[in-house]
Image (cartoon, rainbow, N blue to C red):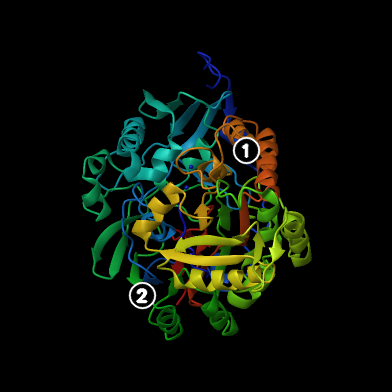
Amino acid sequence: MSRSPRPARARSGPARPSRPAALSGTALALALALAGCASGGTDPAAAGADAGPPKSGGTLTLDIASKPLCLDPQNNNSNGNTAVSRQLVDSLTDQDPATGEARPWLASSFDVSSDATEFTFHLRSGATFSDGKPVDAEAVRANFDTIVKLGAVAAVGSSYLADYKETVVVDPGTAKVVFSRPNAQFLQATSTAALGLLSPASLAGSPQDRCQGKGLAGSGPFTLKSAQGEQIQLTRRADYAWGSSLWKQTGPALLDGVDYKVVPEPGVQTGSLLSGQVHGIIGLQPQDEKTLTDRHIPVVTRSVPGVVYNLTANTRNPVLADAAVRTAITRGIDRAELVTTLLSPSYRPATSVLSSTTPSYTDLGSDLSYDPDQARRLLDAAGWTPGADGVRTKNGTRLQVKLLYPGVDAASRTVLQLVQQQLTKIGVAADLNGLPLNELAPAQANGSYDLLWYGLTRSDPDVLRTAFASGAKNRAQLPAGNELDTLLSRQSAVVDAAQRRELVTTAQQLIVRQAYAIPVYEQIQAVGLAAGVKGVELDGSAQPRLHDAWLAG
């Protein structure tokens, strides 16, 4: 899932045995300790400290920066959309934010074949969609079949279902999802909103109607009440009784409802929270985080899992085809200065191409330390000599690169302007080229850039395959069949967590040390909350969980 880069804020095996050897879901799960799962910020809201026992009632009001383009969780590609739609749908599994482990949700248990081609889900009884239809194996099949048919319309979900063969209805309470090739990432994918389940009647609606919320019936703890103008209202399902095993409360949500108000201006958001007009802000900007913490307003934060914000190099560019030049640029960026100058203490300078909250993250901070002297030595050795204006040249060619980013994002431009200044000190001229979103995707597909600024959200290391495997979305423009391709293909077929982690670690090392991507910083999800708001946590994908939320006063 793509992230809009706003400092302050996706995807020939062995033959299947006729009776596959099964691993328990917890054995396959990525039970890995993650560094920095809740970076920075305070979290009294999550614990409900000193507020007495949780109580029901009240409507939680939240400011969000932009109106979701699509309320259908299966048909959106932004974190802002998911912050709302996540409350409407349940998933087969949930992901423990602290360990990466897959945990029961709509599926009370799950089994995975030894070759990762068959995933069997044993469904909880009694769960229903908001239109009264049962959450059964037929509904699971209808959802996955429909997502595959939607293709690019459900881009994130369909990428999780690559090489999907079928869903077998073993019995009403058992669904077996079958792939034609090993698909180790699929279990984590079943915890995402992109594969959240909708009623079969909802699936029959047009993509346009579903985006507008028409006929949208999930099995989640809230239902869509209205989506008018700049306000989206959710209401509690009184009969809800099948929440995730990770949630603290059982039964229906504690809140009567949730109202989202679209307020684009960060300063207005902060003022509304401080004056008591709203209970919270989702996507708090770094400049406003300090304002709240200075006034002892709770701020819940978490590094967003996936590919960190980075500059991926187009290796087909003659200049950037040289690993020495790419490495020099890596060493010429002062990540600590970027974070301390423009962001907040909750942010982390990147220490790998994966964020620290992503399963199989490996700390490669020593490969990313700021060392402008080494950068200059690398460029000297590669034959790039300083010109009269400070920009290096070689055989009459200036060391000048085009840096592509979403032009609608002024905050990104501010960050990249400082990167531009830093690179000037080592003799590299970076031309910032901000494009409208409708021009950015074609430019990316055509390779019309030297350095590409972006981040991807996914709490599974397979996000590296989405970003770097050869194909249409190969942002580094690497040739097919390269070493990285092989590593990313192998990790997608390995069930054993330790073996997969080893392959992912090697892939991270290759990306960072060859500087195919130049990691810059980890994105943060920050939620500012009034003191009376309790029980709000961030899930494995850094999205707010609101089932356990309650109002103390």
The residue positioned 59% from the left and 27% from the top of the image is: 23
The percent position of residue 10, horizontal first and vertical second, equals 47, 47
The disc, 1 or 2, on the residue closer to the chain's N-terminal end is: 2
Front one among 146 and 483: 483
The percent position of residue 192, horizontal first and vertical second, equals 46, 47
Task: Please name the residue that numbered disc 1 is placed on.
Answer: 484
Q: Is residue 468 above or below residue 290?
A: above
Cα distance in 3D space between marks 1 and 2: 42 Å
Front one among 53 and 483: 483
Task: Please name the residue that numbered disc 2 is placed on.
Answer: 263
Say what secondary structure mark 1 lies in: helix
The residue positioned 52% from the left and 74% from the top of the image is: 414
**Residue 35, image quadrant:** bottom right
Say if residue 77 shows up in the picture. no
Front one among 548 and 528: 528
Residue 73's tag is none
**Residue 160, image quadrant:** top left
Q: Is residue 89 above or below residue 500?
A: below
From the viewer's perspective, is 339 left or right of 242?
right
> What crowding class fits label 2: few (fewer than 14 Cα within 10 Å), some (14-19), or many (20 or more)?
some
Say if residue 171 shows up in the picture. yes
Front one among 459 and 378: 378
From the viewer's perspective, is 190 left or right of 141?
right
> What crowding class fits label 1: few (fewer than 14 Cα within 10 Å), some (14-19), or many (20 or more)?
many
From the viewer's perspective, is 9 left or right of 170?
right
Q: Is residue 29 above or below residue 390?
A: above
